């Protein structure tokens, strides 16, 4: 993290000047926040926050320890420097730091504002965000400060809340460079090219509304009265643009809207994409963070539109849950002493299942491709996680280091469990209803402003559907019994099969690496053990070749992730250019990707005549 102490005297004088120039009475009924992205203090941004009227003797100001959707401790307060408080006459007040995220101010009735500097998270990431004990912030939930170039404002990293004022409206004023455009699902209330003003009804809605500032590489389109904004920041790979990604994103979201039908009423949706070089001072957490009406995503420079589709196909379905259907733990989320909901299987598992189901139902993928994706999830769940785990217990205790390691299974087994529920509903209703109908009825029963008690969700689902659904949930989700998915797939005429799957990393076959990462001399070298690596044979790589770049992605031998991502999930048949040094001389190798495949257990449709349950389920 780039840090350099700024004189407290300078900060004090600046804050005092600003305070004296403003009205000295706290009479507003909302929280006033100012974020300055123009004047940067050694890679830090200045934030001021003015409370509504306070009558208590003392008040605290807090940044979140955790935010919804991450299931991991963040401690955003550790990125704050030079925290100060000022009274109505512009004079400094005594501040006591209670913990990493909390500051206490006494004589609070005299408080005019607090002011502080914020560091970004992208240039200080270490470890993995979802490992058992690490509290590195997952990049899509993080912040970035690149003076004059790009700012990622996940608001939890910049703005906090005053004690007992979380549910008061927020008004946020952001000064930004004229050459940068801010994109968000929120609407800018200021017409200036250098000032944006956003309002939200409460703090939780502000945290749920990220903003990205960058040069205006933006594409927009409208689907059934929903405005979609795609903003891309890709400094190194100029071919990754919003216009290049737009056609596939638009095609996918049209299909999603059609799949959801009247359940989705989102007016505006923002997709904010940051393309990282994955270097020492750059974002390394690849993926996305859902918000109710937007997504923040971080991709490698090797990304394609298929990567964006894969991510957004999941995240957009969060407009259904938790936006329309969620528990009180989420609705009244405690950012600093969280009580986690027991229904992660519901929020993430069903969402992930929908991200694949809609594609087969709307003709974007075939039935065989859908079944292959579900088979991969079954393989991952079996390989990476224990067979018997209560998903409700895991969800409630996901912040516990042991349970945190199991979180990723909501995207594997969680989706498979949702598939089984869908099949049960199809079978019991004679093919007339499915899990989407169940979600539509739950959205009518609850909705954005009517959260449920955790204990009432399963009975509500059972009442809407069938007793068999409730029995399934209690047996396999609450109790956590091991499950044979073919017991349910067979109802739809699906049987076991052997399928071919590609290796994840092109230069690793049968757990044997066909490369050597020399971190001392900073080289990635090809190791030709035999003739069994199809990628090496196709591209003409030779033993001891030093790989410099793969399709423009520079391999950094000091960063194993950078090396792996350069050859991860390569798409068969796609053009590939590899720049190498061979015997000290530069060589460029060109070809189309071919990689090794291996046999794996999968599923297939049994027989030539299709099952009627299968037809209603996937068509």
Image (cartoon, rainbow, N blue to C red):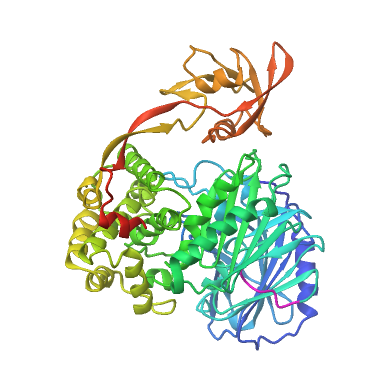
Residue nearer the viewer, 451 or 619:
619
At horizontal 77% and vertical 60% (from top left) the residue drawn is 180
**Residue 81: x and y, percent?**
65, 58
Left or right of residue 346: residue 572: right
**Residue 450: x and y, percent?**
39, 79
The quadrant the C terminus occupies is: bottom left
Residue nearer the viewer, 144 or 346:
346
Residue nearer the viewer, 62 or 334:
334
At horizontal 31% and vertical 62% (from top left) the residue drawn is 342
How many numbered dots are placed on residues in this image?
0
User: Most extreme residue toward the front, as rendered?
Assistant: 609
Residue nearer the viewer, 328 or 543:
543
Left or right of residue 366: residue 84: right
Examine the residues drawn in magenta and state their main secondary structure. Answer: loop
**Residue 391: x and y, percent?**
29, 55
Quadrant in the rendering for residue 349: bottom left
**Residue 552: x and y, percent?**
69, 34
Quadrant in the rendering for residue 107: bottom right
Left or right of residue 597: residue 196: right
Question: Is there any visible trace of residue 269 in the rendered image?
Answer: yes
Quadrant in the rendering for residue 151: bottom right
> Magenta segment, which residues?
185-190
Left or right of residue 27: residue 536: left
Q: Is residue 378 magenta?
A: no
At horizontal 53% and vertical 49% (from top left) the residue drawn is 287
Q: Is residue 186 magenta?
A: yes
Task: Look at the picture and state if 467 lies above or below 563.
Answer: below
Question: Is there any visible trace of residue 78 in the rendered image?
Answer: no
Task: Look at the picture and state if 74 lies above or below 460.
Answer: above
């Amino acid at each position: 993290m780039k840090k350099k102490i700024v004189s407290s005297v300078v900060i004090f004088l600046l804050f005092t000047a600003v305070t004296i120039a403003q009205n000295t009475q706290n009479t507003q009924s909302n929280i006033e926040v100012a974020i300055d992205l123009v004047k940067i203090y050694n890679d830090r941004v200045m934030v001021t926050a003015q409370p509504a009227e306070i009558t208590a003797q003392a008040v605290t100001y807090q940044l979140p320890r955790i935010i919804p959707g991450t299931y991991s401790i963040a401690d955003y307060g550790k990125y704050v420097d030079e925290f100060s408080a000022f009274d109505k006459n512009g004079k400094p007040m005594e501040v006591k730091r209670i913990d990493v995220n909390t500051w206490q101010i006494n004589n609070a009735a005299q408080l005019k504002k607090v002011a502080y500097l914020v560091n970004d998270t992208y240039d200080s990431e270490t470890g993995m965000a979802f490992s058992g004990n690490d509290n590195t912030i997952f990049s899509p939930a993080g912040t970035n400060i690149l003076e004059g170039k790009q700012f990622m404002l996940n608001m939890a990293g910049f703005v906090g809340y005053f004690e007992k004022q979380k549910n008061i409206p927020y008004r946020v004023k952001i000064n930004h460079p004229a050459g940068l455009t801010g994109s968000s699902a929120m609407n800018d209330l200021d017409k200036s090219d250098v000032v944006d003003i956003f309002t939200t009804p409460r703090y939780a809605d502000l945290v749920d509304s990220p903003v990205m500032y960058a040069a205006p590489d933006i594409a927009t389109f409208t689907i059934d009265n929903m405005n979609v904004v795609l903003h891309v920041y890709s400094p190194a790979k100029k071919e990754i643009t919003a216009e290049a990604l737009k056609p596939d994103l638009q095609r996918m979201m049209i299909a999603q809207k059609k799949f959801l039908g009247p359940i989705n009423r989102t007016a505006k949706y923002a997709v904010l994409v940051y393309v990282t070089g994955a270097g020492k001072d750059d974002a390394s957490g690849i993926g996305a963070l859902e918000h109710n009406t937007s997504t923040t995503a971080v991709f490698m420079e090797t990304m394609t539109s298929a990567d964006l589709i894969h991510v957004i196909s999941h995240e957009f379905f969060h407009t259904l849950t938790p936006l329309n259907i969620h528990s009180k733990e989420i609705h009244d989320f405690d950012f600093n002493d969280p009580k986690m909901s027991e229904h992660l299987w519901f929020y993430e598992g069903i969402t992930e299942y929908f991200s694949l189901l809609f594609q087969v139902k709307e003709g974007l993928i075939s039935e065989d491709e859908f079944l292959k994706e579900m088979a991969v999830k079954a393989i991952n769940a079996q390989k990476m996680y224990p067979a018997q785990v209560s998903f409700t217990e895991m969800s409630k205790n996901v912040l516990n280091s042991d349970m945190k390691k199991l979180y990723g299974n909501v995207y594997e087994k969680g989706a498979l469990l949702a598939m089984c529920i869908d099949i049960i509903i199809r079978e019991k209703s004679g093919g007339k209803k499915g899990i989407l109908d169940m979600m539509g009825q739950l959205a009518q029963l609850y909705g954005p402003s009517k959260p449920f008690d955790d204990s009432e969700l399963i009975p509500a689902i059972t009442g809407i559907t069938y007793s068999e659904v409730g029995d399934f949930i209690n047996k396999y989700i609450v109790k956590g019994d091991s499950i044979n998915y073919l017991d349910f797939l067979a109802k739809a005429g699906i049987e076991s099969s052997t399928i071919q799957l590609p290796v994840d990393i092109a230069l690793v076959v049968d757990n044997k690496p066909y490369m050597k990462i020399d971190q001392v001399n900073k080289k990635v070298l090809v190791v030709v053990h035999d003739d069994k690596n199809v990628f090496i044979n196709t591209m003409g790589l030779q033993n001891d070749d030093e790989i410099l770049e793969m399709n423009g992605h520079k391999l950094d031998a000091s960063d194993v992730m950078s090396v792996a991502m350069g050859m991860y999930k390569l798409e068969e048949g796609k053009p590939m250019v590899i720049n190498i040094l061979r015997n000290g001389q530069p060589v460029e190798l060109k070809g189309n990707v071919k990689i090794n495949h291996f046999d794996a257990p999968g599923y297939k449709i049994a027989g030539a005549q299709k099952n009627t349950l299968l037809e209603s389920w996937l068509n």
